[in-house]
Image (tube, rainbow, N blue to C red):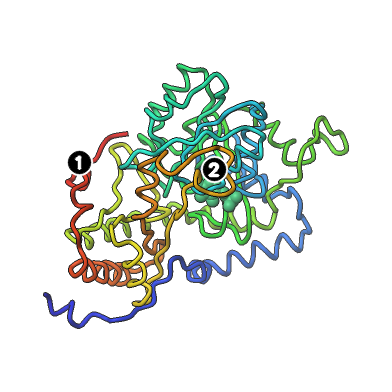
Amino acid sequence: MSTQMLTSPKHQNVPFVDLGIQYQAIAAEINHAISKVIQEADFILGREVRLFEEEFAAFCDVPYAVGVDSGTSALELALRAFDIGPGDEVITAANSFIASALGVSHAGAKPVLVDVDPYTYTLDVTAIERAITRRTKAILPVHLYGHPAHMDPIQQLADKHGLMVIEDACQAHGARYKGKRVGSLSHAAAFSFYPGKNLGAYGDGGMVVTNDKKVANRLEMLRNYGQKEKYKHLFRGYNRRLDTMQAAILRVKLRYLEKWNAARRWNASLYQKHLEGSGVVVPGEAGGAESVWHLYVIRTEQRDQLKDHLVSKGINASIHYPVPIHLQPAYQDLGHKRGDFPVTEAYAEKILSLPMYAELTGRQIEFVAQTISEFQAVNRTGQVACEPHVRGISPSL
Ligand SMILES: *Cc1c(COP(=O)(O)O)cnc(C)c1O
């Protein structure tokens, strides 16, 4: 045991995320952007919305972006823009935030859940193929925790069966797959600007990006009462616009996103270094993937005890997600039972998300890792260390 370990603090506050510290660094720019919108009284689909759409589209390497009021709306409206609705099936992950399925349901279609790949936590491609029916219209891969899904094999499957691919990129702003940005890898992609996301507003917000001009035009109408020009309503659209105020805030923050994502990548590498040999399973990147580490999710057999231990030391860890979608009361009508998705279900008992944000310090990360290692030294059962990919075998995308 090193002397450093003996003199290390016993308790240190490490929040799960810290939006205040990020605001402090850019407060002047943010305050200016907000007051400008108020002074110009440009509140609804204002200039800042259009500029943010252009800048976000460029960031994603796609020609079009349409701002909406949330990530859930982005998913729903993207599906509606492709005329996916009642009678149609959309394949997505059982291991995701529930909004991945809600977007499908709100469009009137049926979410068909499948299990995930044990290394990347994203859609298991062989499971997708088994789930395809005559009704399947789209595959909706989720870039979970900021790690891109297996897009090439998914696209090949989609081509073979004539399906659309729509990315749920709500946790992955800026991630890359074989060098390409997520959002540019399919027909359309949905982003969320929920405050805690890698690019977060000060309220709700979302975006659909696409390389299809017709789809972009349709989305512009869908979010704005179905109108093409004022008081000309071509169909029964919605009021799902991105706020000008949020767009102005997001424009400021977008300029920092690359830097913040790089800091998250660095923080992930520090966690990995300090957790080596601790016996917990640390997350990795598949070959060809560049994750933006929205969440840093480890696995361990004594998850609940470890979480309590961390909390007792001032460290806020969290679980994403404790109950898989198919076991939620909201989706009882899909008729699933425990045992249907073994990877998702096993992981729900083992996963633990450690504090992760750009401003996390090296000292904080070391403290978290050391607290985990100390707990493990006493409580380790060694079971998870037997999983194949823990022994350094990382698959490619
Ligand atoms: C956050 C999130 C959503 C929904 O975004 P909201 O803006 O909260 O509606 C959808 N899918 C995933 C994977 C998410 O993490």
Task: From the viewer's perspective, tell me whether residue 229 is left or right of residue 156.
Answer: right
User: As displayed, is residue 8 above or below residue 338?
Assistant: below
* Residue 86: assigned label: none
The residue located at (21%, 67%) in the rendering is 379
* Proximity of marks 2 and 1: CB atoms separated by less than 8 Å: no
The residue wearing badge 1 is 393
In terms of sequence position, does the residue under pointer 2 or pointer 1 come before the other? 2
User: As displayed, is residue 160 above or below residue 248?
Assistant: above
Residue 161, horizontal then vertical, whole percent? 48, 17
The residue located at (28%, 72%) in the rendering is 367
Task: From the viewer's perspective, tell me whether residue 397 is left or right of residue 370.
Answer: right
Q: Quadrant of the C terminus?
A: top left
Ligand 1 closer than 8 Å to label 1 CB: no
Residue 71, horizontal then vertical, whole percent? 59, 47
User: As displayed, is residue 174 above or below residue 255?
Assistant: above
Name the one closer to the observer, 386 or 100. Answer: 386
SS under mark 1? loop
* Residue 165 in view in this figure: yes
The residue wearing badge 2 is 100
Ligand 1 closer than 8 Å to label 2 CB: yes
* Residue 365 image-quadrant placement: bottom left
Q: Residue furthest left?
A: 1
Name the one closer to the observer, 85 or 275. Answer: 85
Residue 102, horizontal then vertical, whole percent? 60, 43
SS under mark 2? helix
Task: From the viewer's perspective, tell me whether residue 286 is left or right of residue 390.
Answer: right
